């Protein structure tokens, strides 16, 4: 089971997910990209298109 780095809640990952899929934390709404590992999945923060970072 993967935990959300933002809020420490469990992020549910469907068993039939594929690498590169985006999952969203139900608790805080953060989006993560799936990375396939030997055992299950890891997550990394997804680049959210459309966010304006002040440029
Ligand atoms: Zn979260």
Image (cartoon, helix red, strand yellow):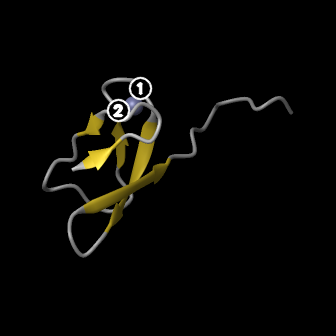
CA gap, disc 1 and disc 2: 5 Å
Residue picked out by circle 2: 25
Residue 46 percent across, percent down from the top left: 51, 46
Tell me the tag on residue 29: 1
Q: Helix, strand or loop at disc 2?
A: loop
Seen from the viewer's position, the closer of residues 7 and 40 is 7
Q: Helix, strand or loop at disc 1?
A: loop
In this view, 53 is above or below 15? above
Residue reaching furthest to the front: 8
Q: Quadrant of residue 52?
A: top right
Q: Does the beta carbon at disc 2 come under 8 Å from ligand 1?
A: yes
Seen from the viewer's position, the closer of residues 21 and 39 is 39
Residue reaching furthest to the right: 55
Q: Quadrant of ligand 1?
A: top left
For the residue carrying disc 1, how many other residues have a C-alpha within 10 Å: few (<14), some (14-19), or many (20+)? few
Q: Does the beta carbon at disc 1 come under 8 Å from ligand 1?
A: yes
């Amino acid at each position: 089971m993967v935990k959300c780095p933002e809020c420490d809640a469990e992020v549910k990952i469907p068993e039939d997910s594929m690498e590169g899929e985006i999952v969203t934390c139900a608790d805080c709404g953060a989006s993560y990209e799936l990375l396939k590992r030997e055992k299950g999945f890891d997550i990394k923060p997804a680049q959210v298109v459309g966010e304006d970072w002040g440029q």
